[in-house]
Amino acid sequence: AKTTVNERTENIPIYECQRETPLQHHNEHITHALEILAKEADFRNDDINYSRALAFRRAACVFKCLPSRVEGVQEIQSLHNIGSHVKRIVEDILDNGYSSEAEKTENNDWFKTMMTFTGVFGVGPAIADKWYRLGLRTIEDLKIEQTLPNKDERISTGLTFHDDLTLPVLRSEAEALADLIRCELDTIDPQYQLVVTGGFRRGKDCGHDVDILLTHPVEGKEKGILEDLLHRLDRQGRLIYGKREQSTWNDGVLQGENIKGQYLKSTLDHFEKWIGIMKLDKKCRQCCLNYGLNSNEKQQELLHSSLDMKKVSHLRPDTMSHMDPKNNSTKRKCPSSSSEDRGTNDRTWYARRVDLIVTPTSQFYYALVGWTGSKHFNRSLRLYAQKELHMKLTSHALYDTTKKHLIPANSEQEVFKNLHLRYLEPVERNC
Ligand code: CTP
Ligand code: MN
Ligand code: MN
Ligand code: MN
């Protein structure tokens, strides 16, 4: 007998970190609209809109973990986190095939400009909005405008390499970069460990950057590794731009931070890190765009999509097929596209965003969870830890605020165990 979505979903737990959220799900038609509205609220950049964005994201997360496609509004009556506004949006989608509110937002001049400008490395909603008010609309406008962005080295670098940086980073590139770094680490001390985290670890096939976590099994030996590594990469001519931040961690950090304050909102941590742009050989792009991208229009849409790079994964059913070197049929040449060649014909590399994070081994598994994400998953974990356990979770540690001590973890499984949560694989943390 056919069970309704309702019957199967009445037991969806409240916290996102208590449920499996896969990368590919059944309700893209709904989450797409909700994520646009969330993004728009983010751009408004104030407390009220922060809550609005969160409400849209929470609702989207519920749809992502449903076992089938929602076809009727009665199916969502008993679900959590679906308010009257979201119900109206879903109804509109079910009646008309799309959300007129989301479509209106997508076509809005301010929204479109904010999408473009916040897509520039170093630019957040405040700067993007300021430029909009000055009448600027396009990347070309920014490049021409002499006085505004060029004062900030980060932004001027972001503009210089904008074409490269909006071309999604492929998994093959993340792997090539990791190999390259592993090679350098091995010559320094083979005990250094490296993990590619972020979206790639959650199973995405492409992303906006490569996130790499570095550690050493002997506590303290991780210090200095970044300086050494960056020096070597620099000598190879691989660094375009980067900012190294020193570790600001000390034992007082956890206890000192306001538990009800900022930490749920921000992803700030205290690790030593490098946020930068590196050169990566073009040949590392072993594109596997073998998912029926016949029209050039569709390719353009994908390559320029900065809102939701997961789109590429959604279109490719087998996310790992290209990992098999024997499977030649999946290793195709990238389809030619103007964005692959725009002004880059004369060089052999692309500029790629890279985050390198150094963690002491005692904090490694909390860092791994934190840097694997998703952002919303982290937020959910931290809120859950605070509300349900009176504990404070960060990318450094889990702190019991009543007993006033840290709870160590020697695996990711242990992080979940310490939180009294069922273990979720990285690919199940895509909320
Ligand atoms: N993160 C963090 N502290 C930061 C920046 C990011 O803890 N200062 C975490 C985020 O919460 C996220 C993960 O590190 O879970 C990766 O961040 P990011 O690269 O921004 O997002 P991805 O999920 O990797 O998305 P993409 O594939 O587009 O890079
Ligand atoms: Mn989408
Ligand atoms: Mn990332
Ligand atoms: Mn990142």
Image (spheres, helix red, strand yellow):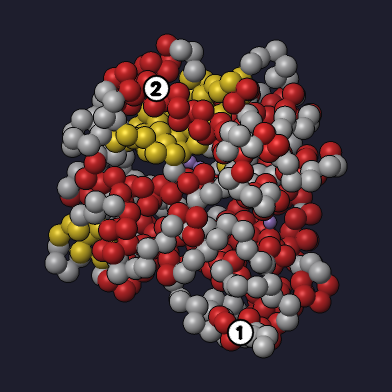
| In the image, residue 252 above or below residue 387 | above
Give the labeled residue for mark 2.
183
| In the image, residue 163 above or below residue 349 | below
Give the percent coordinates (x, y) of residue 355: 45, 35
Looking at the image, residue 140 sits to the left or right of residue 308; the answer is right
Amino acid bearing label 1: Asn
| In the image, residue 251 above or below residue 190 | below
The CA distance from mark 1 to mark 2 is 52 Å
Give the percent coordinates (x, y) of residue 2: 68, 85
Q: Residue at x 56, y 69 (%)?
A: 65
Amino acid bearing label 2: Cys
Q: Residue at x 37, y 20 (%)?
A: 184
| In the image, residue 180 above or below residue 347 | below
Give the labeled residue for mark 1.
6
Label 2: which secondary element? helix
Q: Residue at x 42, y 61 (%)?
A: 424
Looking at the image, residue 360 sits to the left or right of residue 298; the answer is left
